[in-house]
Image (cartoon, rainbow, N blue to C red):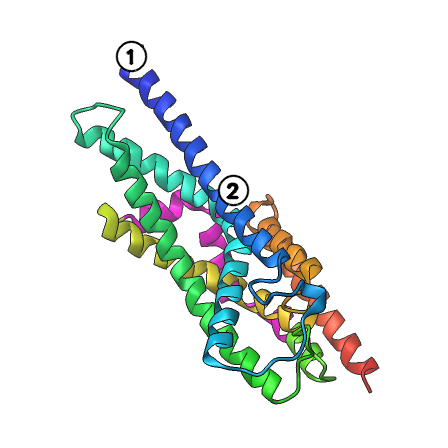
Amino acid sequence: MNSSDVLDAVLRRDRKIVSFVLLKVIAACRLYLLAGAGTGMYPHEILPVTWTPGYALLMFSMWWLMMIAMMLPSAAPMVLLHAAVTRKGLARADDGRPNAPSHRLHSTTTAFIAGYLAMWGAFSLVAVVAQWALERGELLSAMMMSTSKLLGPGLLLAAGVWQLTPFKTVCLRHCRSPISFLSTHWRPGVGGAFRMGIVHGVFCLGCCWFLMALLFYGGVMNLIWIIGLALLVLAEKMMPAGVAFGRVTGLLLITWGVWLGFTAF
């Protein structure tokens, strides 16, 4: 077997390992949400509570794990391509030996994922503050969904308009083009991988943050909304006509928001 065949075999093995780890993380996060996200109650049993530092930390962990479960599937192609490019770089650095030490590959891949998830951790922190403010203003129910006649339509309209903005389109194109992203933003080493993960997370956040905010309308613990939004994000990034699909989604959200606003009074 020549070195090219060995490298192909190693890359296939790496893809299997990284895919398996991603699936395990996603499954663990979703099971955690199904179990009530540490509240001791299932999603349909959530009751009003008093905000304490411990409860705020619990809500932060819930939001972050929910973002991991929703966003990692659509980030998987970028992670897998980053791992493949890293493996080839390690093979060249090791005098053409394809089976370079795996711990360096695992470290850089982990760093890339950590940087990506750090941005969604930042979003989760903002979401917890927003949740606290909305609950304090009695705009959210115990199920953490909008009870306001203005908040729901406002979120739908804002999310719809955001879907049509040039900034959203730029961010979505970056998320849909792993090869272009890596060739433009490549940084070597573990630190470089972490920074690349952050940059990718910024683009992904710019693409999807308003869609995630719709959980305040449909229900933060509403599994149907969680799954539906995750599928929407996945479709935008994976479908051949994902950009157009996102714009159509924006028009539908605007229409929904206008209709909801007219019928609310």
Above or below 103: residue 149 = below
Q: Position of residue 201 (x, y in %)?
A: 41, 58
- Residue 195, located in which quarter of the rendered image? bottom left
Considering the whole magenta stretch, tell me its main secondary structure.
Answer: helix
- Residue 62: mark: none
Please tell me whether residue 171 is drawn above or below residue 156 in the rendered image: above
- Mark 1 is surrounded, within 10 Å at the Cα level, by few (under 14), some (14 to 19) or many (20 or more) other residues, namely few
Is 224 placed left or right of 186 in the picture?
A: right
Q: Of helix, strand and loop, which one carries label 2? A: helix
Labels 1, 2: front one: 2
Q: Is the Cβ of the residue at disc 1 closer than 8 Å to that at disc 2?
A: no
Residue 255 image offset from top left, x and y in percent: 75, 70
Provide the residue span drawn in magenta: 158-186
Magenta stretch holds residue 81: no
The N terminus, quarter of image:
top left
- Of residue 178 and residue 165, the one placed in the foreground of this image is 178
Question: Label for residue 23?
Answer: 2
Q: Nearer the viewer, residue 228 or 32?
A: 32
Q: Amino acid at mark 1?
A: Asn
Which quadrant holds the C terminus? bottom right
